[in-house]
Amino acid sequence: MTKLNIKKLVALCAIIPAVLSAQVGNDDPSAEQGLIGDLVNMPTSNLTSAGQLLRFWLLHVGSAISNNKLSQPECATDVCCPWYAIADDLTQLFVDPATQECTDDARAAVRLGFHDAASWSKKLSADGKDTGGADGSFILFREDERPENNGLQGFVTKILAVRAKHPGVSAADLIQFAAHHATVSCPQGPRIAFFAGRVDATEPSPPGLVPDVHDSSQNLINLFMDKTINAADLAALLGAHTSAKQFHVDEGQATKPIDSTPGIWDTNFYNETLQSNATDGVFRFPSDLLLSKTEHVAVAWEGFVGEQSKWNEAYALAYTRLGLLGVNKINDLIDCSNALPPHIPDAPGAIGGQKRRRRNLYH
Ligand code: HEM
Ligand SMILES: *[C@@H]1O[C@H](CO)[C@@H](O)[C@H](O)[C@H]1NC(C)=O
Ligand SMILES: *[C@@H]1O[C@H](CO)[C@@H](O)[C@H](O)[C@H]1NC(C)=O
Ligand SMILES: *[C@@H]1O[C@H](CO)[C@@H](O)[C@H](O)[C@H]1NC(C)=O
């Protein structure tokens, strides 16, 4: 450090409030470091909370060691804070370390996000029964005991354990965050923006609002229209079956996947449902076969074959709508997408390799 620089720094230190400069103060002038960057000339009235904190730390006041992402009291003022730790826990459940594909818990989380949110009706709402939707009722009132939700009991137990570990967040948000996390945990899955602030249910959701795999295409289309989800959005959302397996439609064929690559969020599902015969080892839902050939849905469906990014964009928009059904505080939600893992553009084994990519998640 030259003499000139030291002079400048000493001059700067003279304008720091006496109390702070006393803490920095040292008889050795080369110990004076002072402020740097834009903080040098920043009036204190312009300081943001980050600026204030960093100013103190640059002046050696207070502790710059942070462990507040991990404990609730320090999280109290940062809505997004708890989601980082929750994301770490969910990664353990959703990513298979051996294959780097998404797991059975991930597919269950996507289905859970759908079933919690979908139990809302525009008509019932207009008739004064604006309950259900993405309100956490599924796990708060154990709706996994309803027959149409069969198969989700195991994952509900796991997500309730995550909730017990992180009590600061709503069950409604936790279910949707898990669905977003699970989706992006599948290679090629979209990283759908996540907003927190949903309010928890005080009663179970209305029954009968979850689709039946044996229903007619017209009934299914009407059911989704009553959730404000149109045919094109329905076509996009049904692509979630790219990650699905079935356990209870035909129990003799339990664990069969709904496309040939259930660990990857690819467009094979769209292609494979359009073929005259099922791909070996793949189970096809009657409702998917019907809807894939129904006017309006069919056009969008065919348009997603081999069109990964087109489908990801459509899915992300359609799922955003789905995840906001029954939410009446949308304007107050806060973007906590930063807590989500990164998008994985390639299938495992493709150039670059997934192991390396996943290692730089949040740390
Ligand atoms: C017409 C609409 C739909 C019908 C009839 C339907 C029906 C089903 C059925 C019967 C299963 C198998 C459950 C089992 O046997 O364990 C299933 C699984 C699944 N569904 Fe759907 N579904 C529909 C729409 C959706 C939507 C919109 C999403 C997501 C946005 C979705 C996501 C999933 C997922 C991820 C699974 C796999 C669950 C697992 O493997 O544990 N489904 N669906
Ligand atoms: C501080 O804020 C005032 C008023 O907003 C603004 O005019 C000035 O440019 C700011 N100074 C700096 C260094 O940002
Ligand atoms: C579909 O399956 C049937 C019956 O197994 C078989 O006769 C037919 O050749 C198959 N069609 C195609 C296109 O593979
Ligand atoms: C769709 O599947 C068929 C039959 O497996 C295959 O021949 C065709 O190449 C696939 N098309 C796309 C776009 O993946």
Image (tube, rainbow, N blue to C red):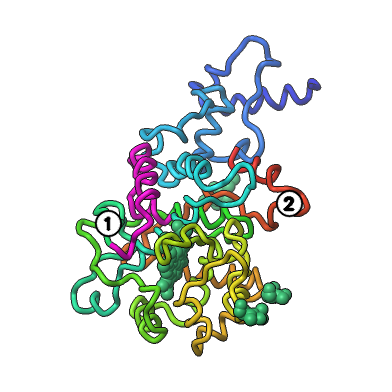
Q: Circle 2 is placed at which residue position?
A: 349
Report the magenta stretch's main SS.
helix
Q: Which mark is residue 196?
A: none
Instruction: Determine whether the residue tagged by mark 1 lies in a helix, strand or loop.
Output: helix
Mark 2 closeness class: few <14, some 14–19, many ≥20 residues within 10 Å: few
| Identity of the residue drawn at 29% across and 74% down | 121
Q: On the rendered structure, is 41 left or right of 140?
A: right
Residue nearer the viewer, 139 or 4: 139
Residue 197: give x, y in percent of width and height. Answer: 36, 54
Crowding near the residue tagged with mark 1, few <14, some 14–19, many ≥20 C-alpha atoms within 10 Å: few
* Amino acid identity at mark 2: Gly
Residue nearer the viewer, 22 or 188: 188
Q: Position of residue 31 (x, y in %)?
A: 67, 16
Asked whether residue 223 is in view, the answer is yes
Query: Which residue lies most toward the right here?
Result: 2
**Quadrant where ligand 3 appears:** bottom right
The residue tagged 1 is: 145
Q: Which quadrant holds residue 308?
A: bottom right
User: Residue 132's spot in the image, x, y percent?
Assistant: 27, 65
Q: Which residues are magenta?
A: 147-176
Q: Which mark is first along the chain, 1 or 2?
A: 1
The residue under the point 49% across, 44% down is: 93
Asked if residue 253 is positioned above or below residue 45 in the image, the reply reads: below
Q: Residue at x 55, y 32 (%)?
A: 55
Pick the quarter of the image with the C terminus. top right
Quarter location, residue 213:
bottom left
